[in-house]
Amino acid sequence: MPIPKSEIQNPKSKIAPAPSPQPPAPLLVVGAVAFDSVRTPYGEAENILGGAATYLAVTASWFAPVRVVAVVGDDLGEEYLRVFHDRGIDTAGLVRAPGKTFRWSGEYTGDMNEARTLETHLNVFERFSPTLPGSYLDSEFVFLGNIDPVLQLHVRRQLPQARLAGLDSMNYWIKGKPEELKKALAEVDILVINETEARMLSGISNLKKAAEVIRKMGPSTLVIKRGEHGVMLFSERGIFSAPAFPLDEVHDPTGAGDSFAGGFMGYLAKAGEFSDGQLRRAVIYGSVMASYAVEEFGLSRLLRLTPKEIEARYREFKTLTHFDA
Amino acid sequence: MPIPKSEIQNPKSKIAPAPSPQPPAPLLVVGAVAFDSVRTPYGEAENILGGAATYLAVTASWFAPVRVVAVVGDDLGEEYLRVFHDRGIDTAGLVRAPGKTFRWSGEYTGDMNEARTLETHLNVFERFSPTLPGSYLDSEFVFLGNIDPVLQLHVRRQLPQARLAGLDSMNYWIKGKPEELKKALAEVDILVINETEARMLSGISNLKKAAEVIRKMGPSTLVIKRGEHGVMLFSERGIFSAPAFPLDEVHDPTGAGDSFAGGFMGYLAKAGEFSDGQLRRAVIYGSVMASYAVEEFGLSRLLRLTPKEIEARYREFKTLTHFDA
């Protein structure tokens, strides 16, 4: 809660000093840094930089300072690390291990709402159990990208000062490690998952009822991603529903969900408070980032965004959804 | 365009006289009146009053006077006609023919987004080719429910004074009578169809591009219904996207699309003008009516609505979608 103005007035003067603008608190993200190979109806790309942590970090970096926790192999050269550094992302928690970087390949066909995974090679990720660098331990904002819930909890517990913790997961963990996932869920504030995952996690088809059940597992706020059908936010303040941005062409959906989460959490770190109004704005900023992410392959579009473009699309979302009361 | 106030001021006085409130112009709807038999996970109902014209007329009647054009058999008794009369619906265009009333049976399973039709008996509908009663010929608003496009055009051409004509269609006609449908489309202002139908009609998977192609076929405004994912409106003024109302339980989706169209067109008849703002409000009122329609089997919920409930859900839609600019 913001402190009422009357309590922070300078007692020596009737004019309160202008508050010095608070720099946004850093957001810590954890997840995979990967080499992706992707095929879509618009073309293909081989061994491009990807992974949840990468999309999360790059998109969030447009809003707040970002700290990344991940592991890479010795095949990930300086030119890739520059992507993080150029965006001002703190890579103190990016560990280099002997071996190969995580590799994923997949393809999208038809309505492109879901990827068909062709290959997954965990490589260095298999033995990853991060101990956070000391400089990360004061992180107030954290997003646990889609990795083993045991690792998610391991990271979460190293951050006792976190004011807001978010988590993403997937079918693989919901089915394979349900108990571990439930333990992790009990220690976060926000869960960001897709429609199918929400139904699987709750065992309920109706999303409104599913959300009630999931929110009792721990996260007071639930964000359900519905691909081209937008996003729903469930919190103690009710439901917010936002459409996806209608695009002429979706070239590569890879990273859309992580770009949403990065924009969403990055905006909340920037805002510094979690009122219903700010959560709703965060959903729109997340949707803005996801809509840009899919316009081109990999990170291309995200890396040459401008703050002006981000604000312009936010306003377009307003035009897209507004009607008079 | 509304006339600027300065031009309608009374020259003899500085105070303009209060404009006498215009009663809404009547909306003419054409389509099937049917006996429906429906099975859903929540139960079943046998031979209940249904059909596109019925849902259109009942939902629109909450906004404007309604004139209905349809044919019924000699098995549809007075107790069914009372449903129309109790809602003040003009049935001068409801023809009684020897034989049985149109019958449809279907079931919904799983996510209930699409009905599986079990049986369709056109019965008296097979020989239906309506000549409109003289009292209908001045209709300024018309909605051509989902029937043979040849009949839709036949009705449309009897209404030269129509200021706004809407049309619904379905896969059956898009595949079976594409040329006839295109002729009908060329003479309407608004097309209301679902997502799958829009893709089939345009041959394009991307909805934004599909909408461009369809709008060139005639209707300057296109409304795409996406079931539980809401509605998109495409017009020369851009795109408007509205979510569906999140319900705990959908008991019977039958008539949801027609209830949307009835609320949408009824509101436009009431508003009397088709600005972008009014079209957007009409989409929400349509969504309100569809959300009530599916709460119970058949017409039950729609028949005992109150204006207060309609306005309350409209405001809930505002809460559901609002975010600060």
Image (cartoon, coloured by chain):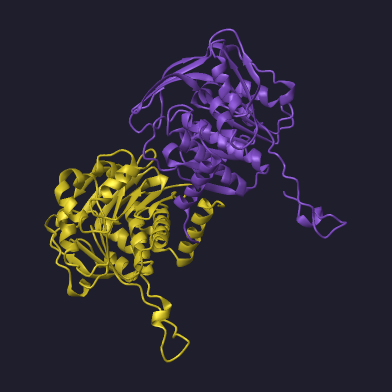
Chain colours: A yellow, B purple
- The answer to which quarter of the image holds residue A285 is bottom left
Identify the residue at horizontal 51%, vertical 56% (top origin).
A318
Identify the residue at horizontal 48%, vertical 48% (top origin).
B317
Residue at the far right: name it. Answer: B12
Describe residue B175's horizontal placement relative to residue B132 as left or right: left
Q: Nearer the viewer, residue A81 or B239?
A: B239
- The answer to which quarter of the image holds residue A269 is bottom left
Q: Nearer the viewer, residue B284 or A61?
A: B284
Q: Is residue A311 above or below residue B176?
A: below
Identify the image quadrant of the N terminus of chain A: bottom left
**Residue A115 in sight:** no
Q: Nearer the viewer, residue A235 or A61?
A: A235
Identify the residue at horizontal 38%, vertical 63% (top origin).
A275
Q: Is residue B292 above or below residue A13?
A: above
Q: How many marks?
A: 0
Give the image location of residue B282, x and y in percent. 58, 42
Q: Is residue B55 above or below residue A94?
A: above
Give the image location of residue A143, x and y in percent. 27, 61
- The answer to which quarter of the image holds residue B252 is top left
**Residue A63 in sight:** yes
Q: Is residue A83 above or below residue B230?
A: below
Give the image location of residue A39, x and y in percent. 33, 45
Give the image location of residue A30, x and y in percent. 23, 61
Residue at the far top: name it. Answer: B98
